């Protein structure tokens, strides 16, 4: 019963003030799209895996921190303040200095240098950050070029011809541009001299060191990388060959030098405008490439030759990026052709 304003009871039943029903979407909120849920779970999984692997890599790196020593009998000279390992072949003839590329050292030139040594005095150095030379930062193209010039001065090499492979082309180019009257000629072998992008491996923290050591411990991985860059014309690496590539990256300071190089510059390189200055120099220049070099575009040899003011390039059919190993006779012939044009007084 209800009571009206006069106090009289009303027969009308009291109305209930009910709340409106909740909308269906409030009781059952819409779910995120399935692909967003999957991506979110995947991100969480990746984060957990990354943290776990990082935690495991710390004790692994400590356990595998042992270092090997350089081989006995190496030869060194002080080059621009860097204790520099070098190798010499031949005793007579005009001088040639060989400049290696990334993940290489003086030993990479063995087959080609032996052929050139029949008519020349041949030298090769280990650039800082590579091989068995002292690791001295900064690992820049200019610093390595100063080391190269320092080697030539320290050994008293008179107007050598420079032959540079892969990323070593930038180092040789910078050395020539700094002291053009020191050299008699310049060859780019499987290299363009341009900068190599620096991958942000630092974000991996200790994981990158673990990954490097796992790769170096695997003979199969080293052989696979070598075969992909050298091509079918190269003999399969034996145990000594695997050790030749692995050992320089296991000596004291090697990892710091590698990460320092990658973090500083990625790999030796010069701006196109700097390389173009080579066109103004009178010393002879040459470009030689493997026809199947997968590191560069098909038209790279012609482009590189035009960029540095060299004549038409020499392209070796069947050769890949390591033409100095797969086709040493053809590369030697190309070097000899440049040596015939060398200008000691340039």
Image (cartoon, helix red, strand yellow):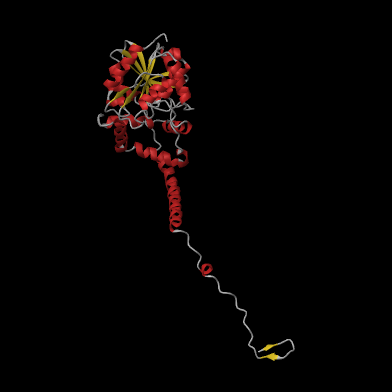
Residue at 56% over, 74% down? 21
Q: Is residue 78 visible?
A: no
In the displayed structure image, the side of residue 28 where residue 288 appears, left or right: left
**Placement of the C terminus among the 4 image quadrants:** top left
Q: Position of residue 199 (x, y in %)?
A: 44, 36
Count of all numbered marks drawn on residues in the image = 0
What residue occupies the far top of the structure in this picture? 345
Q: Is residue 103 visible?
A: yes
Q: Position of residue 254 (x, y in %)?
A: 41, 31
Q: Position of residue 255 (x, y in %)?
A: 42, 33
Quadrant for residue 276, please give it: top left
Q: Position of residue 310 (x, y in %)?
A: 38, 19
Quadrant for residue 237, please give it: top left
Residue at 39% over, 30% down? 251
Compared with residue 269, is residue 55 higher up or lower down, i.e. above or below?
Answer: below
Pick whichever, 337 or 199, lies toward us: 337
**Placement of the N terminus among the 4 image quadrants:** bottom right
Compared with residue 49, is residue 8 higher up or lower down, i.e. above or below?
Answer: below
Pick whichever, 56 or 167, lies toward us: 167
Pick whichever, 282 or 223, lies toward us: 282
What residue occupies the far right of the structure in this picture? 6
Compared with residue 55, is residue 190 higher up or lower down, i.e. above or below?
Answer: above
Pick whichever, 256 or 271, lies toward us: 271
């Amino acid at each position: 019963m209800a009571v009206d304003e006069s106090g009289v009871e009303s027969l009308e039943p009291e109305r209930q003030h009910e709340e409106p029903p909740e909308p269906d979407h409030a009781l059952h909120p819409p779910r995120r799209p399935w692909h967003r849920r999957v991506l979110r779970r995947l991100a969480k999984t990746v984060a957990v895996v990354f943290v776990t692997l990082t935690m495991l890599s710390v004790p692994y790196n400590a356990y595998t921190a042992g270092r090997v020593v350089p081989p006995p009998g190496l030869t060194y000279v002080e080059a621009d303040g860097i204790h520099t390992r070098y190798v010499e072949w031949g005793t007579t003839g005009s001088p040639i200095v060989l400049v290696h590329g990334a993940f290489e050292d003086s030993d990479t030139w063995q087959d080609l240098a032996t052929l050139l040594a029949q008519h020349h005095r041949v030298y090769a150095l280990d650039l800082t950050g590579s091989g068995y030379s002292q690791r001295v930062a900064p690992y820049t193209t200019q610093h390595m070029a100063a080391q190269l010039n320092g080697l030539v001065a320290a050994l008293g090499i008179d107007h050598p011809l420079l032959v540079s492979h892969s990323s070593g082309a930038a180092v040789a180019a910078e050395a020539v541009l700094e002291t053009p009257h020191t050299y008699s000629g310049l060859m780019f072998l499987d290299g363009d001299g341009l900068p190599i992008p620096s991958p942000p491996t630092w974000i991996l923290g200790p994981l990158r060191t673990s990954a490097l050591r796992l790769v170096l411990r695997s003979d199969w991985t080293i052989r696979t990388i070598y075969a992909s860059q050298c091509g079918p014309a190269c003999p399969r690496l034996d145990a000594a060959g695997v050790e030749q590539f692995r050992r320089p990256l296991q000596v004291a300071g090697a990892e710091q030098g590698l990460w320092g190089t990658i973090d500083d510059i990625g790999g030796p390189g010069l701006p196109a405008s700097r390389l173009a200055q080579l066109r103004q120099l009178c010393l002879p220049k040459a470009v030689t490439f493997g026809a199947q070099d997968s590191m560069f575009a098909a038209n790279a040899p012609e482009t590189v030759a035009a960029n540095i003011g060299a004549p038409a390039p020499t392209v070796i059919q069947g050769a890949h990026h390591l033409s100095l190993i797969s086709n040493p006779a053809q590369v030697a012939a190309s070097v000899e052709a440049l040596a015939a044009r060398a200008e000691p007084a340039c």
